Amino acid sequence: MDLYGEFEWRGLMYDATDGVRELLARDRVTTYAGFDPTAASLHVGHLLPIMALARAQRFGHSPIAVVGGGTGLIGDPSGKTAERQLLTVDQVNANVEGIRGQLARFLDFESRNAPARLVNNADWLTGLTAVEFMRDIGKHFSVNAMLAKESVKRRIESDEGISYTEFSYALLQAYDYLVLYDRFHCTLQMGGSDQWGNITAGMDLIRRVRGGKAHGLVMPLLTTAGGTKFGKTEAGSVWLDPTLTKPYVLYQFWLNADDRDAGTYLKFFTFLEAQRITELEAASAREPEKRHAQRELAREVTRLVHGDAAVREAESATGALFGADISGMSVDELLRVFPSVPSKTVPYQPDGWRVQTLLTEGGLTKSISDATRLIKSRAVYVNGRLFTDERKRLRREDALDGQLFLLQKGKKDHLIIRIQQG
């Protein structure tokens, strides 16, 4: 199987220009995808183009990851209903540095046969003068054609409209493609389906200026089976930076994937082969409560993003969260495996604390009566053990190391209660 066939069976082929199938079967190509540094980290939504580059390298093609230190100063209007807030040069530069390390986990920059490259388009865009831009690039684009692009039409029809700054973004990205074509003979750009207009603009520029042939390949935009935007949770975006999203939280994001999405995500976000994915889907169909596909998905993606140690910690935390007795754990161990669980500090009380009060004040239940009902229905755990006595008060000697309690409501909601010292 070649790269095109790999994309097809994984469901990653949304659209491609004529000749891409033959090109990938015949030649070793140089391909690129861009990542604008609009934040200090990439998020799980960026994994699709990152994995596309990594798959290309595994099939012998040379990938280029373009970090948009230049285009990031402008902002891509594709898929956006309002103008992005412009970032300062210092903000963009700081974001670029953070993103470099994340991309390096997926791409082999030392390969002899198909080396990956990491480039910053600020290197050629920030030195481009306005006159050069209009004379050498702008003259090759029809305003009529640019107005017909879906991303532009949608913004023009909105109340806010579109600024000249964002209107020009497609031309800057087109120039990126031309520079990469000249420097590295890059002939394939990949991205999400919302990038189709920007990609074809670059192909047109290469044809007009160099008489060359370039191609585009786009992947589907993801939504969950429930219709929500992929990569978003109630707490916000799921980042690849471990200081912004703890590895345990990343693991849980995949573990909690809808059964209807798990097979698709295994194809999109792992390197597992078709036979293994089929086995996992069959196992999940037989025993959905064991979440075979989701566990393998969580393990594989967390390993790719953060390494084996992060997987071990995440699985240790998951085992403790879902039914294991944690009474023998130290405070340090518990805090290490539950880094993202919300916590609340309470003052010491000689006569102890009512669990209902702790649950309610900690936000796990709406009221004391709601907490009592949950205790009666056997849905509350304290330090990993079922709590059934609604009249029992917790005392310091019940706490782990006399310092804290781990409260659990149902299967997913947890709260650490810290006892104020002194």
Image (tube, rainbow, N blue to C red):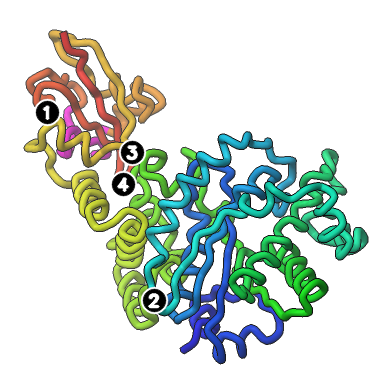
Magenta residues span 375-389
Residue 225 location, x and y as percent?
53, 61
Residue to which mark 1 is pinned: 400
Q: Residues within 10 Å of mark 4 (few under 14, many from 20)?
A: many
Nearer to us: label 1 or label 4 = 4
Instruction: Decide which of tag 2 and tag 3 comes sooner along the chain.
Output: 2
Nearer to us: label 2 or label 1 = 2
Question: Residue at left 46%, top 89%?
Answer: 1
Measure the alpha-carbon separation of dots 3 and 1: 19 Å
Amino acid type shown at disc 1: Leu
Amino acid type shown at disc 3: Asp
Amino acid type shown at disc 4: Tyr
Residue to which mark 2 is pinned: 112
Residue 160 location, x and y as percent?
82, 39
410, above or below 231, in the image: above
Helix, strand or loop at disc 2? loop
405, above or below 202, in the image: above
Amino acid type shown at disc 2: Arg
Residue to which mark 4 is pinned: 248
Nearer to us: label 3 or label 1 = 1
Nearer to us: label 3 or label 4 = 4
Measure the alpha-carbon separation of dots 1 and 4: 21 Å
Residue 254 location, x and y as percent?
39, 56
Q: Please indicate whether residue 418 sits to the left or right of residue 277 in the image.
A: left
Q: Which image quadrant: the C terminus?
A: top left
Q: Residues within 10 Å of mark 3 (few under 14, many from 20)?
A: some
Instruction: Decide which of tag 2 and tag 1 comes sooner along the chain.
Output: 2
